[in-house]
Amino acid sequence: MAAAEEDRHLRLTGEFDCDATPLATLRHSTSHVMAQAVKRLFPEVKVAIGPAIDDGFYYDFAKAEPFTPEDLARIEDVMREIVKANVPFERQELARADAVAFFEKLGERFKVEILHGIEAPTVSLYKQGDFIDLCRGPHVRATGEIKAFKLLSSSGAYWRGDEKNPMLQRIYGTAWLSQEDLDKYLWRLEEAKKRDHRKLGRELDLFDFYDVAPGAPFWLPNGMILVRELEKFARERLDAQGYRHSAYTASQELTADEVRLLGSYVRGPRIWDAAALLPTVTRLTNLGLITPVSATGAAMRRLSFTRLPARAVPPPRACRRHRAG
Ligand SMILES: [Zn+2]
């Protein structure tokens, strides 16, 4: 959903045509309230876009200094005031040229840039209190409908995700239909932190990192127990599905780049450049040479993949336990 929402915010045409799902609408509306609060506290800041994303929302701001945790707390306080004031979201339509003039006057260069990319003759603006934003909508009717939200973090993000563009400051937040849902979500985040592999890796002596291969984990004996259990699990599942295994040493079927990419892939999923690797994996998968699911267990110097079954996949055999029973 995130990519589609973002795209929608860059190509809006004045009609809202998206699925008005309650959560996405609520979260996106919360991003407007956040932008309003930020503009109140930091009037010099320029606004970019603020889509709903999975589990929350963000808004990007042009600001020289990053937001601090104290800033986020202050922004959250102002947001609560705006929610309490229960200001309506008011839609108005404007000729595109007038909207360009309007945002140029405000110095909102990102809005002007978005408007230049739109072909529609009219666009929609949404106003809540002292804040007005170029947006296709939809939103909740008034800020009072925002019940449970929290700002989570901030980080740098390039405008339109392109490193040649200016670096913006992005604030992430989350919003839910009830306080109970929000509390549950925050609890899940806390639990996930406790299970962060970087933390567990250190505490349980699972893996270590060395300069010779930055980003590639060197598995310690405890970690290898996990790796081997996962391999065993994958092998059993694949055997049951009728997959046949084969191993490739760097062969003519692979270019040097592909060997390098796949090598990094099999050594440690955390370091592969997914975007760069994808065409190779797709090509080899389409050729029927590999199925990437079993690549995790390969030895360092050997690329070992599971060859897809030559014929139609036979029906799965009963697992060991059921055969025994
Ligand atoms: Zn909006």
Image (cartoon, rainbow, N blue to C red):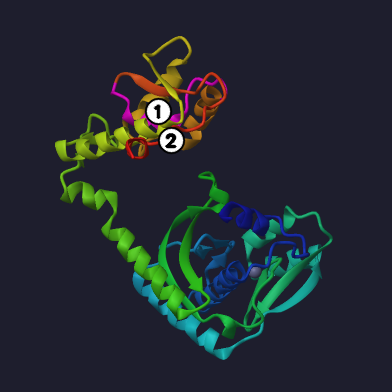
Query: Is ligand 1 within 8 Å of the beta carbon of the residue shown at mark 2?
Result: no
Helix, strand or loop status at disc 2: loop
Magenta stretch: give its range.
286-300
Query: Relative to 84, does residue 220 appear above or below in the rendering?
Result: above
Query: Is residue 209 something that shows in the picture?
Result: no
Amino acid under disc 2: Asp
Query: Would you identify the image quadrant in which residue 22 lies?
Result: bottom right
Q: Is residue 124 left or right of residue 283?
A: right
Q: Is residue 51 left or right of residue 266?
A: right
Q: Any magenta on residue 290?
A: yes
Q: Position of residue 284 (x, y in %)?
A: 52, 22
Checking the image for residue 239, the label placed there is 1
Checking the image for residue 95, the label placed there is none
Query: Would you identify the image quadrant in which residue 26 lies?
Result: bottom right
Residue linked to disc 2 = 273
Q: Any magenta on residue 295?
A: yes
Q: Is residue 239 left or right of residue 54?
A: left
Query: Relative to 39, does residue 206 appear above or below in the rendering?
Result: above
